[in-house]
Amino acid sequence: MHPAREVIAVRFVAGAALLARPRVVLTPLGGRPPDRAAILYARVLGVRHLIEATLLVRQPSPLVLRAGAAIDAIHAASAFALAETDHHRRLATVNTASAAAFAAAGVATARR
């Protein structure tokens, strides 16, 4: 089994959950029901995860994994900045951590 399969599976599940059931995902993470902006953000992020998972299924090469990791690192940096200014601080902090984890997993998987 290619090591990218685990990364792809987690990304697919996360993307599907964010797209289909954002309130169910965000409420426990944020400590309160999300507002419309947070739900929209979650759905857009879910679509991005599904697109990236699809690209990785088609081409799980080190180059594609590293490119995804770079996108995740940029996402983590922007979410970190948002956590410092946004009223959704807790959600933004979780978003930062998850994006950083996806970036690290992408880099580690590309090295295998």
Image (spheres, grey):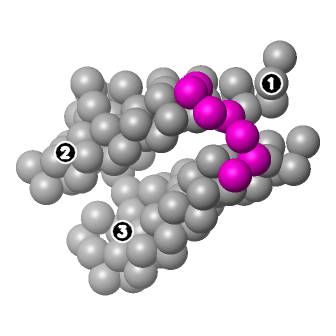
Left or right: where 73 falls relative to 49: right
* Distance between mark 3 and mark 2 Cα atoms: 15 Å
Q: On the image, numbered disc 2 is attached to which residue? A: 39
Graded by Cα atoms within 10 Å as few (under 14), some (14 to 19) or many (20 or more), the crowding at tag 2 reads some
Furthest-right residue in this view:
112
Residue visible at 59% across and 64% down? Answer: 70
Give the alpha-carbon distance from disc 3 to disc 1, as whole Å. 36 Å
Image height check: is 65 above or below 19?
Answer: below
Assess disc 1: are there few (<14), some (14-19) or many (≥20) residues with their C-alpha within 10 Å of its C-alpha: few
* Mark toward the start of the polypeptide (2 vs 1): 1
How many angstroms separate mark 2 from mark 1 (CA)? 33 Å
Q: Which residue is depicted at the point 73% across and 32% down?
A: 4
Q: x, y percentage for residue 75?
A: 46, 65
Q: In this view of the protein, can residue 96 be seen by the observer?
A: no
Disc 3 to disc 2: CB gap under 8 Å: no
Q: Which callout, 3 or 2, points at the residue further toward the start of the chain? A: 2
- Which mark sits nearer the N-terminus, 3 or 1? 1
Q: Give the range drawn in magenta.
A: 57-63
Measuring 27% from the left and 31% from the top, which residue is drawn there?
A: 19
Q: What residue type is labelled 1?
A: His
Task: Write down the residue under mark 1.
Answer: 2
